[in-house]
Amino acid sequence: MATDPAQLPSLPSLPPLPAFPADFLWGVSTSAHQIEGAAELRGRSVWDDFADEPDRIKDGSTAAVACDHYHRYPEDVALLADLGVDAYRFSVSWPRVVSPGGLDFYDRLVDALCAAGVRPVPTLFHWDLPAGLDWLDRDTAARFAAYAERVAARLGDRVGTWITLNEPAEHTLLGHALGVHAPGRRLLFDALPAAHHQLLAHGLAVRALRAAGADAVGIANSHGPTWPASDDPADRAAADLYDTLLNRLFAEPLLLGRYPEGFAELMPGDVAADLAVIAEPLDWYGVNYYAPTLVGAPEGTETESGGVALPAELPFSLRRIEGRPETDFGWPVVPEGLTELLTSFAARYGDRLPPVMITENGCSYEGLADQDRIAYLDGHLRALHDALAAGVDVRGYFVWSLLDNFEWAEGYARRFGLVHVDYATQARTPKASYAWYRAALRAQRA
Ligand code: IFM
């Protein structure tokens, strides 16, 4: 591990970032399935089954070893301490917790984080559902609450800040509607019950966590501005529908206690009673932001944007945002989209929106001298500061991700880390962006 500044790639000279509030929470994020490895020491997840199917993962890889964080967590905690973050967002693997001794790992990790002065911020579900469970079954929500209760009983003496779910919108869209993530279902709009059951699971877990003494419960939802491809009414209508699916379908039940018009009818069960659970007040609201989406009317063919292919039969199509730099993933770099998203969210939800934390923001680029990542993070932090200046109550920011890791259907081809991982040797090497973030945090505290 090379954390001596002399060994880090040189820093570009950028003007200092504007000052954020003194109590702003600075962090980095990861998730269990993407980094832990040690698959033989946990139960199987839907992602293990998915990766075993032919052609599901682009490079044919699995997460069986990943970054071997399960065994190397002391080194990774040392990297966090050296980076100088206040908080570390990681996820708890449900398939590990249901295996004998599985919770012991998180006990050790939380102890190591506390000893290093880094606040642990666990996410309870980041897509690795135990194999055999299914979000189309209502019962999965109750099982999730029981699992949350069990984790909180073990870690709650040291953990106060919790995240229930990561990106239920992406998990529903990619995993259940389009079939490009586990569990690989292509149900299109028939995937909506999986969304409802995740939201119900969230509400039940909020209650379980609070009963266990949690003091700061939130969720991490993916959001981004949705731009119509033109002023044509058909493009506007398509963009509105996409905006509803990405930005309102999961936020409104949580913040307003209702589904956007026309959606409650498509959900299973006693929706009104469930909404009372789902709308359990949150202490904070997590936003994962990567890029805006340009949306147009259907074109009669499959469309693709940023690695996601949309079938022709959907009532919208994705378009390329021209004239912007793109990450290695093909995602456009639009920092001001973060300001737009946050100010429009604050305007839309007013005092129903609790304090916000950016629970993920980052980009995939190759190389140790990752100037593009530095430019991306620098630009997004300035955009975030603009949102604060406009009055949005944002309390924290987490870079995705600490380590290069298993990027789901892309396998190991996308590198989002501040720290490079050599998957053959498991050597960790901080990139220039790690040095830049560390210097930025030091400057904020000076
Ligand atoms: O790696 C993912 C993460 O698991 C969820 N949010 C988006 C990241 C980048 O694709």
Image (cartoon, rainbow, N blue to C red):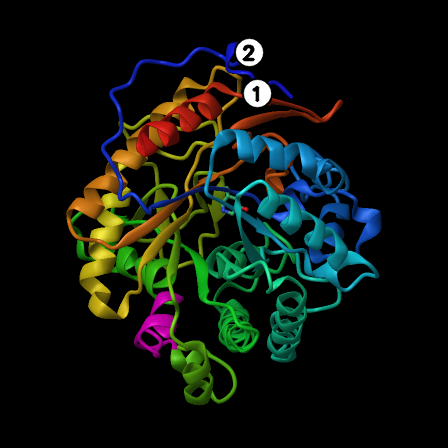
Question: Is residue 405 shown to the viewer in this render?
Answer: no
Mark 2 and mark 1 residues within 8 Å of each other at the beta carbon: yes
Image: 277 above or below 217: below
Q: Is mark 2 on a helix, strand or loop?
A: helix
Instruction: Tell me the CA gap for discs 2 and 1.
Output: 7 Å
Residue visible at 49% across and 55% down? 170
The x, y position of residue 416, in whole percent, is: 52, 32
Q: Which three-letter amino acid code belongs to the residue tagged 1?
A: Thr
Query: Which quadrant: the N terminus?
Result: top right
Amino acid carrying mark 2 in the image: Gln
Disc 1 element = loop
Q: Where is residue 302 in the image (x, y as percent from the top left)?
A: 46, 46
Q: Quadrant of residue 154?
A: bottom right
- Residue 393: percent from the left, percent from the top? 25, 55
The stretch drawn in magenta includes residue 253: yes
Q: Residue drawn 51% across and 78% down?
A: 207
Above or below: residue 269 compared with residue 106 = below
Q: Is mark 2 within 8 Å of ligand 1?
A: no
Name the one closer to the observer, 233 or 348. Answer: 348
- Left/right placement of residue 88 relative to residue 32 reads left
* Boundaries of the magenta span: 250-263
According to the image, label 2 marks what residue? Answer: 7
Q: Mark 1 points at which residue?
A: 3
Residue 320 - label = none
